[in-house]
């Protein structure tokens, strides 16, 4: 449905960094977006995830028409919204002609209007040839307000709504025009943690029920994992991994993704044996046996990622020799409500193990940790 190809956007930079483009422009240019390409299928909720400054919002704003990219193309339902490639004639459809819905981080609600008027406004300002009758506008607005559970607030001033209600109002105003694509720029970031979790679930339900194709921008990995059909993880203007939430969490492509998505333990080592997709990696604390789809020759430096929840803690060792069982000492523990984190010293490593809250082992206790071969992730160092 949406196709973004080789999108590039640069900004003027200072002399401390950025790509040196002095020969062509006489100034340095900083790449906010550097050759980004992806597609979004109809009905999908596609998330751009990454830290501040990685280019996710610039990519979203380029799709909306609020940024003018240097090069690349953006096509929606085979309609070219932007194209600047080589010698071909450039295309840049104006923001108001793209027909997209957008929800901003600040909501951008008009304070002098009622809830009803806020939602009706995008329909009332349409071009003459696309004008709707008052009756049709009222019907569509009330239908959307009902979906958002805002019907009883229709005549209330928008400023008299709670934060969660304002977020739903901004969403209602964006979808009332029935856009082919909905753009959401960190819409939950201004809410407190409890309300954010509640509205995250509500947003997921609404998106699935209405079947709206959406692009969601966030720096919150939990939000991205909970909401998304697919996730594009961005770093310094590039997409470093694209895939389904479970795939990205369980099989990160690089150290940055493993570190940014959730919490993990990194164990550097050297591949000492390989049999098909099964590897043995020698680390300073002992050997690790694991399964990996990547092609790494024996003798290569690698890093093994072990999520805290894949590390099992035991107070006694196995009677028989078991792969990936190491002896360590509990250094500290933290009760987190739904789990208990134990920091375990194993040789020069301090490993975080996240276990069931019924398990709580005293600091300075000797323990044995076990890690399943199919739950570890290996990547090139």
Image (cartoon, rainbow, N blue to C red):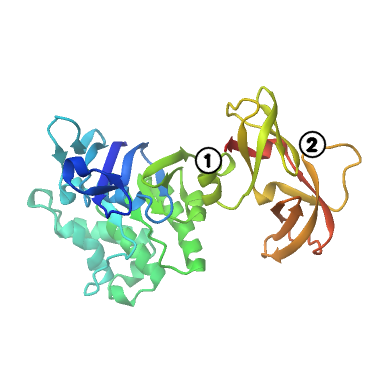
Is 372 above or below relative to 148? above
- Residue 156 in sight: no
Q: Position of residue 374 (x, y in %)?
A: 68, 36
The N terminus is located in which quarter? top left
Q: Residue furthest top?
A: 276
Name the residue at 49% across, 63% down: 198
Q: Nearer the viewer, residue 271 or 325?
A: 271
Query: Is 188 drawn above or below residue 313 in the view shown?
Result: below
- Callout 1 secondary element: loop
How many numbered circles does the render carry? 2
Q: Quadrant of the C terminus?
A: top right
Spatial CA distance of label 1 from label 2 is 25 Å
Query: Is residue 295 or residue 168 the one in the foreground?
Result: 295
**Side (left or right) of 169 relative to 25:** right
Q: Is residue 251 left or right of residue 286?
A: left
Q: Position of residue 334 (x, y in %)?
A: 70, 65
- 153 sits to left or right of 374: left
Q: Which element type, helix, strand or loop, lies under badge 2? A: loop
Q: Is residue 79 or residue 63 the one in the foreground?
A: 63
Left or right, 111 with respect to 304, comes to: left
Is residue 302 in sight in this rendering? yes
Residue at 19% over, 62% down:
121
Residue linked to disc 1:
254
The answer to the question of whether label 1 and label 2 lie on touching residues, with beta carbons closer than 8 A, is no
Q: Which residue is mark 2?
A: 323
Identify the image quadrant of residue 38: top left
Q: Position of residue 327 (x, y in %)?
A: 82, 48
Residue 304 place in picture, x, y as percent: 64, 40
Local crowd size for mark 1, using a 10 Å CA cut-off: few (<14), some (14–19), many (≥20): some
Circle nearer the N terminus (1, 2):
1
Q: Within 10 Å of the Cα at label 2, are there few (<14), some (14-19), or many (20+) other Cα atoms? A: some
């Amino acid at each position: 449905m949406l196709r973004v190809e080789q999108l590039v956007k640069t900004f003027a930079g200072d002399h401390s960094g950025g790509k040196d483009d002095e020969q062509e422009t006489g100034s340095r240019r900083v790449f906010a977006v550097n050759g980004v390409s992806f597609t979004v299928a109809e009905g999908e909720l596609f998330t751009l995830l990454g830290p501040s400054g990685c280019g996710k919002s610039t990519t979203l704003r380029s799709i909306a028409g609020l940024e003018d990219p240097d090069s690349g193309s953006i096509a929606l339902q085979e309609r070219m919204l932007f194209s600047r490639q080589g010698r071909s004639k450039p295309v840049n459809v104006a923001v108001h002609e793209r027909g997209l819905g957008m929800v901003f981080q600040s909501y951008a609600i008009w304070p002098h209007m009622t809830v009803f008027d806020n939602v009706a406004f995008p329909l009332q300002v349409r071009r003459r040839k696309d004008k709707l009758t008052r009756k049709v506008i009222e019907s569509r607005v009330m239908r959307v307000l009902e979906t958002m559970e805002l019907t009883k607030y229709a005549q209330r001033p928008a400023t008299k709504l709670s934060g969660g209600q304002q977020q739903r109002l901004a969403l209602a105003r964006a979808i009332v025009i029935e856009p082919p694509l909905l753009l959401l720029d960190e819409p939950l970031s201004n809410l407190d943690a409890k309300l954010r979790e509640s509205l995250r679930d509500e947003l997921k339900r609404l998106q699935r029920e209405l079947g709206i194709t959406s692009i969601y921008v966030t720096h919150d990995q939990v939000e991205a994992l909970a909401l998304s059909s697919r996730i594009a993880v961005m770093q310094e203007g590039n997409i470093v991994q694209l895939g389904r939430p479970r795939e990205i969490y369980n099989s990160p492509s690089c150290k940055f993704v493993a570190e940014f998505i959730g919490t993990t333990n990194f164990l550097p080592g050297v591949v000492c044996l390989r049999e098909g997709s099964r590897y043995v990696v020698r680390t300073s604390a002992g050997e690790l046996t694991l399964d990996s789809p990547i092609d790494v020759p024996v003798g290569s430096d690698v890093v093994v990622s072990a999520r805290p929840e894949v590390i099992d803690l035991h107070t006694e060792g196995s009677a028989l020799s078991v792969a990936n069982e190491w002896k360590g000492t509990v250094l500290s523990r933290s009760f987190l409500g739904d789990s208990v984190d134990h920091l375990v010293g194993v040789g020069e490593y301090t490993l975080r193990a996240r276990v069931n809250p019924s398990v709580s082992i005293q600091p300075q206790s000797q323990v044995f940790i076990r890690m399943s071969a199919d739950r570890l992730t290996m990547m090139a160092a």
